[in-house]
Amino acid sequence: MARPRQPEPKFFLIDELYERGLSYYSATWFDALPNGMRYGEKTTNYLESSTACTRIANDLPNVRLVFMLRNPVDRAHSNYLWSTRNGLETETFERALELEARRENHVEAKLRYARPFAYFSRGLYAELLRPWIERFPREHILVLRTEDVARAPRDVAQKLYRFVSVAEQVELADDLGTINAAHPDGSPEIDPAIREALNARYREPNAELTHLLGPTFTGWDTAQTRVSQ
C-alpha cells in the first residue's frame, strides 16, 4: 500500500496535487515499494467525488476499486461523534441533522474534504457509487460492508485477495480488534427515536443501492439493530 500511509494521498481529489502529474503520484507514494507487485492506496473521499472518478477512469482505466460501506445510520452517528470529539460540532445529533443542508452549502474551505456536517448525505451510497458504476466495468468494482469485517473477517479478506489477484493470506484478518471505534470514550448510543427516523429516510436509498449493485450485494435491513464495531 502507498507509503506513507498517513495522510491519505487524495491525489485524484485535490487539484493542486493532481496538476503535478502521475509521475509525482508514483514517486511520492510508491517509489520505495518493490517492483512486480500490486499497488494500492486508500483515500476515503474518492467515493464522494465525481471529479476523482473521471480522473481515475482517464489515468488508470484498468484499476480495481474497492469500496467499504457501513450501515448508513451508524455511519451518520459515528460521523457526528467524530465531529463532536474534534470540537466541530456543538449541536445535538437531531438538530445537526436538521442543519445539514444549510451547513453543507457554507462549509469552510479547510474542511471541504472532511465534510464534518454531512451526516445523512454521505450515506446515500447509490448516488455516490453511480458515477463509478457508469465509468468502470462492473467486474472492476468490489463493494464490501464494514459489518462483515467484524462478523467474518476471513471471508472478506478472501474476497479482497481474489478480487485484486494476489496470494491469499486470510489469517492476516484475524484479531483485528475494534477499528475506528464509534464509542471510544463512552459516547452515548444513538437515540432510538432518531434511529427509527433515519431508518425510514434511508429505506428507499438502501433499496436503490441493492438494485444498483445486484444480488451479490447484501444491503441493510433498516429495521435491524446496530451491529457493534
Image (cartoon, rainbow, N blue to C red):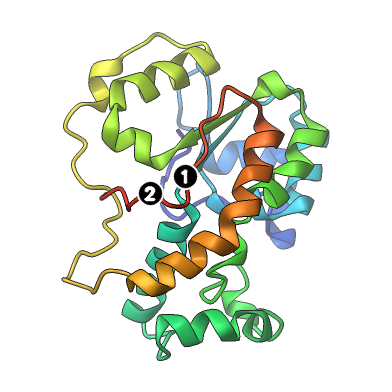
As helix, strand or loop, the secondary structure at mark 1 comes to loop
Q: Is residue 134 above or below residue 11?
A: above
Q: Residue at x 53, y 69 (%)?
A: 119
Identify the residue at the far bottom of this view: 90
Residue 54, labelled with which disc? none
Q: Residue at x 29, y 61 (%)?
A: 182
User: In the image shown, does 123 or 169 lie closer to the viewer?
Assistant: 123
x, y percentage for residue 227? 30, 48
User: In the image shown, does 27 or 175 lie closer to the viewer?
Assistant: 175
| Left-right relation of 76 to 54 | left
Classify 10 Å Cα crowding around label 2: few (below 14), some (14-19), many (20 and above).
few
Circles 1, 2 touching at the beta carbon (< 8 Å): yes
- Residue bearing mark 1: 221
User: In the image shown, does 37 or 99 lie closer to the viewer?
Assistant: 99
Residue 224, labelled with which disc? 2
Classify 10 Å Cα crowding around label 1: few (below 14), some (14-19), many (20 and above).
few
x, y percentage for residue 175? 16, 32
Q: Is residue 162 above or below residue 195?
A: above
As helix, strand or loop, the secondary structure at mark 2 comes to loop
Residue 26 sits in quarter: top right
Q: Residue at x 75, y 43 (%)?
A: 130
x, y percentage for residue 132? 74, 39
Q: Is residue 215 above or below residue 222?
A: above
